[in-house]
Every structure is written in C-alpha cells, then in structure tokens.
Image (cartoon, coloured by chain):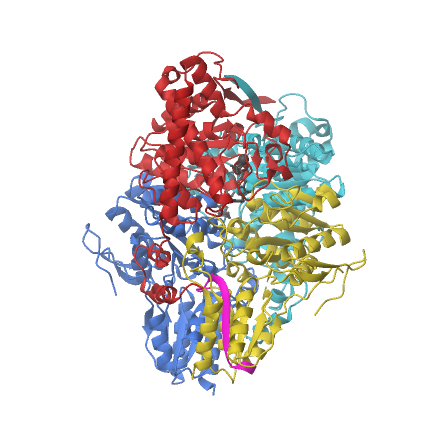
Chain colours: A red, B cyan, C yellow, D blue
Amino acid sequence: MTIVARFEIELTRYLDADGAALGELPAFASNRETLVELYRWMVLARTFDQKAIALQRTGRLGTYASSLGQEGVSVGLAHAMRPEDVLLPSFREHGAQLLRGVTPKELLQYWGGDERGSNFAVPRQDFPVCIPVGSHAPHAAGAALAFKLRGEPRAAVAVFGDGATSKGDVYEAMNVAGAWQLPIVFVATNNQWAISVPRNAQTAAATLAQKAIGAGLEGRQVDGNDVIAVRQVIGEALDKARSGGSATLIEALTYRLADHTTADDASRYRDDDEVAKHWKQEPVARLRSHLTTAHSWSKAEEEALIEACAAQVEQATDAYLAEPPEPPEAMFDHLYAELPSALAAQRDAALAETPE
Amino acid sequence: MTIVARFEIELTRYLDADGAALGELPAFASNRETLVELYRWMVLARTFDQKAIALQRTGRLGTYASSLGQEGVSVGLAHAMRPEDVLLPSFREHGAQLLRGVTPKELLQYWGGDERGSNFAVPRQDFPVCIPVGSHAPHAAGAALAFKLRGEPRAAVAVFGDGATSKGDVYEAMNVAGAWQLPIVFVATNNQWAISVPRNAQTAAATLAQKAIGAGLEGRQVDGNDVIAVRQVIGEALDKARSGGSATLIEALTYRLADHTTADDASRYRDDDEVAKHWKQEPVARLRSHLTTAHSWSKAEEEALIEACAAQVEQATDAYLAEPPEPPEAMFDHLYAELPSALAAQRDAALAETPE
Amino acid sequence: MTTSSESTQAAAQAVECTLVEGVNLALARALQDDPTVVILGEDVGIDGGVFRATQSLIGRFDESRVRDTPLSEALIGGLPIGLAAMGLRPVAEIQFMGFIYPVIDQLVNHASRMRTRTRGRLSCPLVIRAPYGGGVHAPEHHSESMEAMFTHIPGIRVVIPSSPAKAYGLLLAAIRDPDPVVFLEPKRIYRAVRETVVDDGRALALDHCFVTREGSDVTLIGWGAALSEVMDAAETLATDGVEAEVIDVATLKLLDFETIAASVEKTGRCVIVHEAPVSGGFGAEIAARLAGAGLVNLLAPIERVAGWDTIMPLPRLEDRYMPSAGRVVAAARRVMEYS
Amino acid sequence: MTTSSESTQAAAQAVECTLVEGVNLALARALQDDPTVVILGEDVGIDGGVFRATQSLIGRFDESRVRDTPLSEALIGGLPIGLAAMGLRPVAEIQFMGFIYPVIDQLVNHASRMRTRTRGRLSCPLVIRAPYGGGVHAPEHHSESMEAMFTHIPGIRVVIPSSPAKAYGLLLAAIRDPDPVVFLEPKRIYRAVRETVVDDGRALALDHCFVTREGSDVTLIGWGAALSEVMDAAETLATDGVEAEVIDVATLKLLDFETIAASVEKTGRCVIVHEAPVSGGFGAEIAARLAGAGLVNLLAPIERVAGWDTIMPLPRLEDRYMPSAGRVVAAARRVMEYS
Ligand SMILES: Cc1ncc(C[n+]2csc(CCOP(=O)(O)OP(=O)(O)O)c2C)c(N)n1
Ligand SMILES: Cc1ncc(C[n+]2csc(CCOP(=O)(O)OP(=O)(O)O)c2C)c(N)n1
Ligand SMILES: [Mg+2]
Ligand SMILES: [Mg+2]
C-alpha cells in the first residue's frame, strides 16, 4: 500500500456576508473606482433582470432565465477578462455578457426570439448563449486551441452551472484541456440547483471543484457572492492560462434566488426558508456594504447609479420593442454562406405564403 | 484561503516482478489451490489468445483483440466475482469471460462473426462484449440500480481501458454511481495504450484512479500484473458494493504486450524496448515464479496444465469450425420479440435471394 | 382497436383530460400495475417534470421508482439499457427533444440490438419519452422535430400520439412492448384539447395507423401536433366539396403501410404533412413506399407539406416555419387539380 | 466539373492511387495550401489513422496541426466548432461511423446553426470525416451505413465519394466549403481500385450528381461503395440490351435533384440503391422527390434496393444483408417489365 497521489481543494473568500474584509484584500480592491465599476455592472445586471421578467410577464419576451443572486460570479469573471479573450456563456450570464459589451437591446432580442440578438456588435468573437447544458465546453477547447496554435495570448472562459458538471461533454472538454494544456478557465456557477435537482443529488463529490482532478487540472472554490474573490481567482486563472499554464476549473459558490426561469415555480421543490437564508449572502448588498463602510459610498451615489441603470435598460427596451421582426427570408439567408440553388424554391415558397 | 477537501490515491501490490512477496499476503493467497486456479485461468486465457490469433492469421476468425499481458487483471477480477454478479466486459476481457463460464467456443463464434457467440449458455445475465469504447458503463449503472431496487446483494463489474476513461459516458456513469450509491466496480485496465495513443496523451491526470474523485467515488490503483493484488482489491470493492457502500473505480496497471488487434501493427508507434521491458513484469510468469518458489509448483504440473489448456482450446476450435452459419432468417427472428408483419415481406425477400 | 388489458387493479375511471394528463395517467397506471416499471429523468420527481407529465407520481409511488437523474443525457440513454436487460421496465424522460441526441448512440449501438446480438438472451423493453415540436414560442433548441433520426434505426419503434386517449393507450402499449420504444410527445397540443380517457389500463395497438376522418377524394397523412392542421385543412376542403380522408400515423416505426396504401389507392391523391424539415423527414419514407407500391389509381404527384430545410427559427419567425393548414389546403387543391 | 483551384503550391502531379490515398492526398494538399487547416482525431498522428488516411502527415507538417485526440467522440464533435468559429479549418476524423453518434448533438445543436443563430457573425467551416459501410467482415458496430441521420440535418452538407479522384476532389471542396460538411468514406472500396488522380489542388463541385454511365432505359442511382454493384448491374443489364443510366449522387445533401429528375424523365424508370436500411434511408428522399415531381414519363414504380430493416449482421451473415448486384438487376428487370 503506497500513496501515489494527493490533492486538495482550496476556497477563496475576502469579504464576509456583511461586506467586511476577512483579511488583506487583493491590490485591485483598494481602488474605489474599480469596486464601483464592479458594483455598477452588478446593479445593471439586476436591473436588466427585473425588466426582462416584467417584459416576459406581460407577453413581450420569451421564457427568461434570471441571474438574480448570481451577479457576483458573472460580473467578477467578465471583469477579469480582456477584450480579446472569448466568453462562452450559459443562459444565465447576462452580467458577464453586458460587461463584455453585449447591449441590453441585443440580450432582449435574443430572449425575445430574434436571432439578431446573438449578432453582437461588440464582442464579435464571443459565443452566443448556450442552451443545451454544457455543450459549449468543447467549443471552449476548440477556441483555446485556436489561440494556442496561433500563439495568441488569449483565453477562453466557459461558464456553466452545477448541473452541467454532470455532463460527459463537459468532462471530455476539461480532460483535453489538461492533456493539451489549453488556455481555458472553466467556471462552474454552483447556484445549488439544476431546476428542481439540488446540488447534492447531482453528484456525491464533496466539491464541484474536485471534478478538475480527474482531468488533470487545478480546481478551486471561490465564494461567488464575493465579487472581489471572483475577480481575483478568475484573474489568476486567466493569467495562468494566457501564459501557457493550462486550464483551471473554478467552482463559484452562489445561489439562484429566483425561479429557474419564468416558466418555473421553484416553490414546488424548495423552501422559502432556504431562499431567505441565501438572501443574506447575496453579492450586490455585500459589495454595497463594503463600499459604504470602506469607501464611503453615499446614498446619492447609490440613487444616481440606480437611476442611470434603469434609464439604460428602459432605453434598450424601447429600442427592442420598436424593432420589427426580420423578414422570413432570414431563415434562408443565413443558413449557408450562400443560398444553395437547391433551396431557392423553398425560399420562394416561404415568401409566397401569407401568414394566417 | 481554506482547504475544503483532501484526497489521496493508494496503490496495492503484493508480489514483485519476480513473484516474491513484498510483505504479508492476503489470506486467500496462502491457499495453493486458489493460486493454482488463478494460474490455470490465466494460462487458459493466454492459450486461447494464441489460438485465436492463429485462426485469424489463417482466415478463420475475424479481427481479434489480444489480451496478452493483461490476464492478471481479467482473471483476478472475475475470480473475485460471484456467479450472480454481472460482468460488463470490454473487448479484451477473454480471461474474465472464460472464468465466468463463457465457453471458448462461444468466444470464437463471437470473434468469428456469429451472434450466437454472445448467447452465453452459462453467465446468462452477463453482458456481451462492448465494442464502442466505454459505452457499457451506463449499462452497469442500470444493472446495479436493478439489483439495488430489488434488494439483491449483487454487483455489476464494468471493465474498460485507459482510453475509455476519456469518455464522457464513462464519467456520467461513475457520477451517477456515486450519487445513487450503486453497487458497481469500475475497472480501468490501464494497459498504457489506446491503439497508438499513449496513456499520457489521453489525460494529464497523474493516475486514472483519481478520475473517481470528481464522481465522489473511491479510486484505487492496483498492480494489474499481480493477480493476487487484483483479486484482493476487487474483492474488497465488491464486498463494499454488495453491502450498500457504493461504487469504486480501480485502475489496474498493466501492459498490452500484443498489437492492439490483429488489424494493428504496434511497431508503427512504439519501441520494441518498451515492450521488452514490460515482458519482465507480466502476470503469468510472475505467478508461476511465486507458485514455484512458495508452493513448489512442479515442472510436471506445469506441463500437464499447458497440455490441458491446449486440449480444451483445440476442442473448442474444432466445434467452432464445424458449426454451420445461421440461416439468414436469424437477422429477422431476433430483431423484435415477434416478427412484425411489417417486416414479413423483407424476410421473405431475404430468404428468396440466393447468395452470389 | 385495443389489445386486451394487462391491468389487474382499480376499476376503470373516465377522466376528462389533456394529452399531458393522458401521459401522466398512463405512467401512474403502469407503475401501479407493474412493479418492474421505473420512471427516470431530469426533474421527473418532486417537480413532476417541466411539463408535469410525471406530476404527483412521487407521492403515490415509492420514490425509488420515480427518480431524478443527474443532468446527463448520455446516461439517461444508457442506464435504462442496464435496467431493462436485468428485467425492469424503465421509462426515461428526455426533457426536450433538443437534448435527446446523446441518446442516439445508446439506441443505435445497444438498445436496438441487445436482443439481436445476444440472440434473445437479453432484451431492452425500455421507453424513451420526450416532448417535441414547435409552435409554442419556446427558447432556442426547444422546438425541433427530429423523429426521422429515430425512424431509421432498426430494432426500435417510434410512436407519436395526437390526442389524450392515444397518449394514454399508446404509452401503455409502449411500456408493455418487449422492445425499445421512442415515444415523442407533441408539446404544442399537450394542453390543446380535453377528451374523455377511460383509465382502464387498456393499451392501444402499436404498428397501427388510425383513420381519423373518412373521405374519398384525397388522403391527408400526418402525426402528432400537425394532425390538427391536417384536420382543419380537411374541414376547409369539405366546404369546397372535397372529402379528405385523414390518417394519423401514430406508430411511425413500424409503419402500418397497408392502411395508408389502401386509402391512397382509394382516393388516388395524397398529401403528407409534418413539422420536421422536409428533406429526409419521415414523410419521405411514406412517399417512397407509395411511389414503390405500384398503385394503379395514383392520380397526382405525392405532395409533402413540411418544415423548410432550415434551422427552426426563434419565436419571432417561428410561424413562418410551421406548416400551416393553409399550406395543407393549397397542396390538397394542387393534387385535386392535377391532371 | 471542377471549380478553379485555390492551390498556390507545387506543380500538379499525377498519381495512381486508391480512394484512401486520394483522401490522404487531399488532406496533405489542404495542409500545404491553407495554414488554417488542422487535422484531428483518434490515431490520426503517428499511426496515420487506422486506415492510413492520415499517413505521413505528421512527418510532413507541424505536429501541432495533426493531432491525436483523447478517446472522446463528443469532444471530436464539439472542439472543431470552437476552432472553426475562431477562424481555423478543422478536419476531424471519427474512426468508424459506429462511433459518430455523439457527434450528432454537436452537429444539430451547434455546427449546423452557428451561422444562422449569430446571423453570420460566427460560422463553422469544419469537416467531419468517417469511414462507413459494410462488406469488409469487420467487427460489430463497424459496418453500418447511417448517412440518412445526417442528410436530415439542415445547415450541413453530406458528401460521399465513390472513387479515388472523387475522394480527392470532393474532400478538397468540403474543406474549402464555408459551412459544415460530413464526409463519409466507403471503406469497402478504400483500396478496391486505383485511378489516376492529378494532385493539382482542384476541387470538384459539391451539390452535384455525377452521371457515370449514360443510358436511356432505366436510371440506377447510388453512392459510395454501392456504386460498384450498380455499375456491375448496369453491365449485366447491357448484355440483355437494357441500357442503364447510372447516377452517383456524391453530394447527398444538398441534393442535385435536377440531374436525377432529368435522367428519370428521360428513362421513365428508376432504381435507387444503398446499403443503409431501406426505411428512412436517403433513397426515400430521392424517391419522394421523384414521386412529388410530377414527371410525365414515369413508367414504373420507383424501386429501392437497400439493406434490410435489420441490425447489420456480424460477418457470417453479412453477405445476406448487403444489397447485391443481383438484387439491383432483378429490380431493374421488374421496372423494365412493369406495365
Ligand atoms: C443538455 C440539456 N439537458 C437539459 C436541459 C434542460 N435544462 C435547462 S437548464 C437545466 C438545469 C441546469 O442546471 P445548472 O447547470 O445548474 O444551471 P442553472 O440553471 O442552475 O444556471 C436543465 C435541466 C438543457 N437545457 N440541456
Ligand atoms: C467509442 C469508440 N471510439 C473509437 C473506437 C475505436 N477503438 C477501438 S479500441 C480503441 C482504443 C481503446 O483503448 P483503451 O480504452 O485503452 O482499451 P484497450 O484497447 O487498450 O484495451 C479505439 C480508439 C471504439 N471502438 N469506440
Ligand atoms: Mg445550477
Ligand atoms: Mg488501453
């Protein structure tokens, strides 16, 4: 009997639930402007979220997946990225997408059922939202391989949920990332639920971070409601990735405060008590407390920020609602690089039809 | 920074490469008869292997996957099983299949291209050989769940290679085995190669056993060329499984001394030196040495055993070669429980055709 | 057409129910009557399934028999094979057809052929259920109709109900069938109509097409949700004096071609309707059989009205993709006027 | 029919080669001419592929461009999407078609629609290669023909060569195509014949059927390895005075139906041949198109000669599964005699 390998999983947290520093903060966190920036994106994400739900409730948006309570992960990870890195988001990373430059109008278009919403004007190489859970993890491996082959110091960041960590394709992608030392950061946003299936029914693994071990990657846990910790840990993983040091899996511990989507009713399967408990940990209030205490964030600043975010989202909503749908030929025009002659007749037939 | 989880991987070995005990042996290994039994099955497996290759070379068998050098794993694991356990073999576990009661004739039929070879007369519930690598791992989860639901003290044993540990379905099966505490032993026969891809190109994980960690299972390494160690470690895992203690992944370290299959030429991608080195570790000679030294295994016994195995395989070969092919209606007769009327005409057409 | 009930329990109860409730009734009946039945899938337990197909099962039956799986579709395809080979009757749910593709590997390579490859020693009496199809303005990947990928797999059956009673009777038949069945549920009509379902444990026959409207002028063929457009089209045509015969294929594999051929031989004209992309859709198989059958009375080309060969659009263009009753009527008129 | 060469390097060289060597030549040419081409798959590196399709590439090109992957087919389906979206041209090998099923998820849900869903912002110029088909007495799961699962997927192309020169020219076209292509190689004829291939970097046109024999009595349609039975059948029929026109479909999706329709309109008779199970095979799509085309000169039912709707048997019964030239001849005679 010999021990042939040993592993450990580390958790990083800087702020307690009330926003008090637990010890020394990373350097960037002494900069008020940086923290306000992080805070602003979280508030924008939350504002967007509320608006999207309201639009859905009134029949002006499709099924929507709220990111309420998870803004710390989403904003923290995107803030650590460089523009030339590439984001591969799940369907709940609105905060990250916004920070990367996807406009609120584009997001509304996507969730409103219009493909133009994924034709981002700004992060031209970011991937569209991935609905089939975890199936974008292999794309991250491909994107990262492209960067590596071209010698570009860029990284791919793939974000998925706790449920996604049960998927074989996610494992396969992590495994090749290790084998080929690919510049990737895998972020498992552990919000404790996959629709009605709780984290502990998903896997017997004590942490999700340890799913890295079998792939030969480093795995770390971070308090996902502490945006400073997320920013720091993802930043370290990105630096490692960009400098040839392979991929990392980061489990970000957070909580889905909302229903799974607007089509879900979470009260069917979880207690209000549990939700109430997690409201005390949530990332926006936590950073606000910290800003207030440590950086004298004022009520006036708070109000101005909230107003600015609301106005931005309102404007995007108006633009979204004003946009007429694409013509039906769009179905054909983007199917292949050129419309094949074999499909010309179908396109004509589709155009000839008058909707009922 | 807090450490939230720690893991270690243990390697078990009792005999050194020359068959000398490295310390105290498990109790069963003091029984000469048991050791001779293990030895006999390994010799039979190797004898069968040589015959199968000879038949393939002379056009009387299809492509065949040799188990040369891996008999310790195959025989050791099957020896630890009870008849009512269920084996889910890869395509290289002839030793395990023979020990379980699959006849050499059935094996030849299967590899000779006759489905009757998988209609085992004896281990009626054992699964047929699995060719799509790793795809039988989820079946093991299903079989184990069946045992658990019925309260039967049985276990499923799924065997696959180092290459298979890169497959997502294998991971998904291990993960559910942990989540549901299923009575399974997963055996990863690490023979260092997946056709031309070496173990280290398959994954950056330091051991394959650690692939258990992300699934919340125990993972162990065993010297697969030490059949005593294999027998012991699999036995422990089976006991645990049958008594409700969940699944285990066991990485058995061994070496594929032969080409990948009769269709392969391993000299294209690996050095003779490496192969020669591994011949010094192989399991049959190792146990023979141990038997000779510790249990006065005699030359006469050895010769008798070799002759008996050869005779058994020869007889099976004759029976295999004498068997006429099934009639073409077999294609239809076993497709559904009853031949659907929709297919009756096709069956008639198939029968009407005279082969060219 | 019914097969004799295997049900031993509980007096027959007539319930007004929707299609998804019909599915739920059949699942409950199967769990009740057959201790080997096990339900599994994502969110099938306490949540009762995202469409409520498994609602309340976990309260009524032992929770070991109604199991939430991890989020692992390859597993949901493979695990039931092990269960079935060991004598149980698993009914696995894939939450939406858009996530069913990892199951194909297990269906083609294992479930469909366990019986063949072991010459009957082991078999796979399993059911894979999945909601499918468009028209409900669902998110991306939630609206496709890919039944034709399954109808090409030898050794399995593919069944699609078009009404609450058919959902009940065909699902019971699928669960009792000794071989693998892919059971696709048209979610657009999950709650579209209510109909009386007698919960008496009677299965409907598989491998059988239903004639849901008789007529002598043209045969309209469809399945699943598209059958409602087909029936609407038949009503419209009737106002013009064209009497359409309507066939609900119900079991796509194994196809009851006799019923179809007899109808088309009678009417001489045929329009096949499905939501899936036209190229390589299951309509092609029906048309090809008709084209090969040497019908003496075929009076017009066989038309297919189907989805375009495009990606299923997101909701804002979805209506321009779905085959409408208007398109069916237009096609029927074309074949009526053909000469 | 060729498209103009994009090749800038190396003078054209005429080589006598087999189909698999044609594949190898095209891969080498693509690696040479286009620095964005990357080859990946299991054993494609030092081993040169289990059929030697990638032989010697790793010696001639940087090994970062010819990559052995881990044994992970879902990954081999998904990773090229990331490469392609970031501007590379991946050519991924699936070792045998029997292991291609995990790729379907990625093809349907991502590769085929990356362009559509991003309205052209990102695209997927990738090729998935796989040997397929029976007749070589291979182990279980190594002999199936499931091309019809792919021809139903909108947004991709499916290409199958039937000769060394077509393998070379069509594979180059597939690699240069800006959209995803599934390229299926009929392994039964990997080494069946040699033909002169001019390694000049000229691609053949996709979406184009080849008329490989002219005739006026009956149209025989096939692709891949089955084309050799079709050509044999045509020769046999010729000895009876029946002149068959033979069409090699080559690109199944997108289908060049004009060439097929023109031929059948001319001959009035048609037999479609493929190894895949008949039900839902790609032959159904061709037959359905013909049945819907309103040809004025159709003189007989459209026959399909194909694999049975059974599991592909292990080698000892394999010959009883494969559609033989004899079956093609018999079908052609039936349609000739039909009245
Ligand atoms: C492959 C796949 N299976 C099932 C679904 C349906 N589904 C959508 S979200 C979800 C749960 C996802 O859980 P998790 O990964 O934890 O992400 P979260 O929703 O919590 O952000 C499921 C099952 C899907 N979208 N994709
Ligand atoms: C899913 C799948 N992919 C590819 C193959 C082709 N193939 C057969 S064996 C093999 C290598 C298997 O390696 P390993 O798992 O280490 O088992 P070993 O052959 O060494 O026993 C490959 C790639 C296959 N059979 N199944
Ligand atoms: Mg979650
Ligand atoms: Mg191996």
Q: Position of residue A157 (x, y in %)?
A: 40, 33
Q: Nearer the viewer, residue C71 or D145?
A: C71
Residue at the extreme bottom of the image, as rendered = D339
- Residue B12 sits in quarter: top right
Q: Position of residue D223 (x, y in %)?
A: 40, 66
Q: Nearer the viewer, residue A158 or A329?
A: A329
The answer to whether residue C232 is above or below residue B276 is below
Q: Nearer the viewer, residue A328 or C265?
A: A328
Q: Position of residue A49 (x, y in %)?
A: 46, 36
- Highlighted range, magenta: C266-280
Q: Is residue C277 magenta?
A: yes
Question: Left or right: where does residue A255 sit relative to residue C311?
Answer: right
Q: Is residue D330 magenta?
A: no
**Is residue B83 in sight in this rendering?**
no
Q: Nearer the viewer, residue C95 or B207?
A: C95
Residue in the picture at 36% in, 21% down: A34
Q: State how many labels appear.
A: 0
Residue at the extreme top of the image, as rendered = A23
- Please state, as top left, top right, bottom left or bottom right, where the C terminus of chain C lies in the image: bottom left
- Please state, as top left, top right, bottom left or bottom right, where the N terminus of chain C lies in the image: bottom right
The answer to whether residue A296 is above or below residue A260 is above
Q: Position of residue A139 (x, y in %)?
A: 41, 41
**Is residue B22 in sight in this rendering?**
yes
- Residue B161 sits in quarter: top right
Question: Left or right: where does residue A20 sit relative to residue B316?
Answer: left
